[in-house]
Amino acid sequence: MSQKTEIKGIIAPIITPMLADESIHFEELRRQTDRLIAAGCHALFCFGTNGEGYALTGMEKKQVLECVIEQTNKRVPVYAGTGCITTRETIAQSLMAEAVGADVLSLVTPSFAQASQSELYEHYKTIAESVHLPIVLYNIPARTGNALAPETVAKLSTIDNIVGVKDSSGSFDNILAYLEAGKARKTGDFATLSGNDSLILKTLQAGGNGAVAGCANVYPHTMVSIYAHYANGDLAVAEAAQESIASFRACFKFGNPNTIVKTAVRLLGYDVGFCRRPFHQLSDEGIAALQAVLAENEAKGMR
């Protein structure tokens, strides 16, 4: 699909199933791939935040990507989260993803060390010049400690193969600023994606293109329906679908959201295992709350 891939819809950041010894459960990864595609997800995103990309080795990322690309068999685009702390390693991971057949790269900002906007611009520009795949920038400052300023996104949007941005800051104002920044691109559209599942509909209404939706691992049909009903002009139904995930998202207060999502998928009966230690614990109170919400939502027909 290369650079013609349209950045839109509900993109599922597929979780990475693991066995008891924390090795990757590739058979279950194939099942989850088919499950998400069957539900109508517009693309799959390997080793993002929900896929525990931060906890996988470079070789494991390659193996996960190869597995998902093979199982997807070109039914939907496959994104690869190849952002690392250094420019050098990010290029290496991006070239790996390009070589095995990914359609789009998602590049999270560097983490731990503080980066200036000038450094972030040069980081992304250098990577873009080193690969041929389309690139979606990824802003999640609460996790990385580095935020992509709208002005930097505007500058980066003028680079041919930087085609979009995902915002997980949780700020709708920031999404609006990115939408405005994307107008600096003169050739083709610049996509803006919500990385916060509670802001999907608002992002679409403001002119955005969709979302990388972690909750799609738990409720793929429901998440896809937000986009589908909006696209069909059924705003009231889209709003109801958007509001329906609030009770599940309220469970995030019990722990790491990635852990909540993976636990929920496991409680739904899928053999996805636990998150890699030390990010694997959920209190009895959290488990009970999650089970109650899952039961309530099942009764409502959410899936």
Image: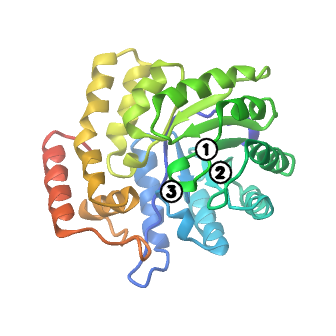
Above or below, 88 relative to 2: below
Front in this rendered view, residue 211 or 124: 124
Residue 92, image quadrant: bottom right
Depth check, mark 1 against mark 2: the one in front is 1
Of pointers 3 and 2, the one earlier in the residue sequence:
3
Residue 109 is labelled as: 2
The percent position of residue 226, horizontal first and vertical second, equals 37, 30
Q: Tell me if mark 1 has few (under 14), some (14-19) or many (20+) residues whose alpha carbon lies within 10 angstroms of its own.
A: many
Q: Nearer the viewer, mark 3 or mark 1?
A: 1
Kind of element beneath mark 1:
loop
Location of mark 1 (residue): 147
Can residue 17 be seen here? The reply is yes
Could you tell me which residue is drawn at 41 percent across and 18 percent down? 232
Secondary structure beneath dot 2 equals loop
Q: Type of residue at label 2?
A: Thr
Residue 49, labelled with which disc? 3
Instruction: Tell me the quadrant of the picture where the C terminus can be found.
Output: top left
Q: Is residue 263 above or below residue 226?
A: below
**Which numbered disc flags the more N-terminal residue, 3 or 1?**
3
Q: Residues within 10 Å of mark 3 (few under 14, many from 20)?
A: many
Label 3 element class = loop
Amino acid type at mark 3: Thr
